[in-house]
Amino acid sequence: MINICPHTMQCKMLPLAKRQQIRLYGTMSAKLKEGLEHTRAMRYQQAADAYREVLRQNPEHADAMHFLGLALWNITQDPQEPLKLIRKSMQLAPDQPQMHHNLASVLGSLDQMDEAIKHYRRAIELKPAYAEAFFNLGGIYKFRPDDPLIAEMQTIYAGNNCSNSDQEYLCFALSKAMNDTAKYHEAFHFALEASRLRSGVFKAEIQQNAVNEAIASLNRSNLARNTSRGDLSEAPVFIIGMPRSGTTLVETILSRHPDIFAAGELPMIGSVSEQMRQWAVHNLAYKGTDYGYLLQMPDEHFNSAARACMGMVNQRAKEQKFIRFTDKMPQNAYKLAQISMLFPNARIIHVRRHPLDTCISCFFQRFRTGHEYSYRLQWLGRYYRHYSAIMDHWKQTISLPILEVSYEDIVQNPEANARKLIEFSGLDWSNSCLEPQKSDRAVMTASRWQVRQPIYKTSLERWKRYQPWLQPLIDALGGMEWINDQAPT
């Protein structure tokens, strides 16, 4: 997801005029706060309802208008109405740096990079120590060795007057800048410091227990017991793999086909899985983790959950007609048993990349939420081993067709792999799939800049630039022998 700055979360964060505006409309300030709390929790529909209530009382409330646009953008990924609202809010409040930042985030996901960079720069002009703006600018911008932005960031960082959050943003931004300018020791230093500043703990034992439960309780026999439940549509294509493994590139290639709707990272499988698990807890006294309940659930639950998932896809697609749709949520790698029960005719595309390249790319990336394992090299290694173990299990147990592709092979042989992807999807070839950079879809992930470029090879063997500092990761993965066995050939 793109990073949006909720600049009105607390009144003290606003300039005086804004604080007066919120106090002036007393009851609406509570409703605005409610909307912002929903935004922070990513409950975008509830947030939109709250902002609309504010606007019913005051149609020119710039903050409510701005955040309504952002909420609608996250709900629909259709830019027309969100951009109209955001731009109008900025006419009412033209010098709010956070508004320029948020507009830039939306524009960047739409491949309007020049305008996005302009607004990030304007946000920094209005707020020179705007660490989050520096960070998000770095996501769509290649730093040069003599770039004055690097000096500005270093000055702010050296001043040591930032909050921990701002220091973290600056360290991630500086690690990107140092990597761009081939100063790899400094890049790794800032990545380590950024990760140290990140809060959160990865509970590897919980995930290990879940993987163990899947291996112990789910086998080919009991997973194939009933293949008529769920939705029998052949439309779903699930793209899975580790984050930063090339899943966005694969989705973008497929999105260029006229009969494929690229739905992005849908939360639907995780959501319906958790709802079913909770039902099992309350109605079947289930006490396990993510998998054991599956064999106890009545078929109707899978049928209704599959209908809900298809409804979500159709809502996001709006008027677009499609024969196939893609769901690119990487964490669905842990949900293939659920997917096989919800959509027994689905297709799975598993994207692999060299383990060290994958992990280094994760380590340098500031994920928004849900990737606590990426904060430490040792945690990354353990998480990758869990992911590898569950994928090995699924290959032996589920009946869904799985196509394995490697990032390395795609960037070196793009046409052959694009044709393989389309053939696996059961569709006729389209030459447009050879130019994924021309996709006009919204890209909400950290790969939004990369997928707009022609396919390139510069990320291959990136880990070798950082090899002197990777021993904790190598040890957690199980050593170079295991890593080499896992690396795509």
Image: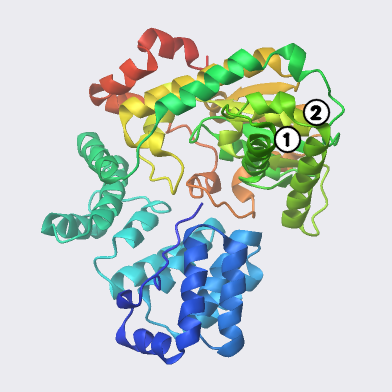
Determine if residue 435 is in view.
Answer: no
Question: In the figure, 128 relative to 25: above or below?
Answer: above
Front residue of this view, candidates 190 and 259: 190
- Give, as a three-letter code, the residue at label 1: Val
Task: Please rate how many residues cluster around mark 2, counting C-alpha atoms within 10 Å: few if below 14, some from 14 to 19, many from 20.
Answer: many
Front residue of this view, candidates 206 and 282: 282
Q: Which residue position holds label 2?
A: 344
For the residues labelled 2 and 1, say whether their Cβ atoms are less than 8 Å apart: no
Front residue of this view, candidates 101 and 383: 383
Question: In the figure, 331 relative to 392: above or below?
Answer: below
- Give, as a three-letter code, the residue at label 2: Pro
Q: According to the image, what is the colour scheme of the structure?
A: rainbow
Residue name at image x 72 percent, y 24 percent: 295
Q: Which residue position holds label 1?
A: 237
How many numbered marks, from 0 up? 2
Residue 177 position, x and y percent, is 29, 47
Please report whichever mark, 2 or 1, sits nearer to the chain's N-terminal start. 1
Determine if residue 37 is in view.
Answer: yes
Task: Please rate how many residues cluster around mark 1, counting C-alpha atoms within 10 Å: few if below 14, some from 14 to 19, many from 20.
Answer: many
Q: Label 2's element?
A: loop
Per the rendering, the mark at residue 29 is none
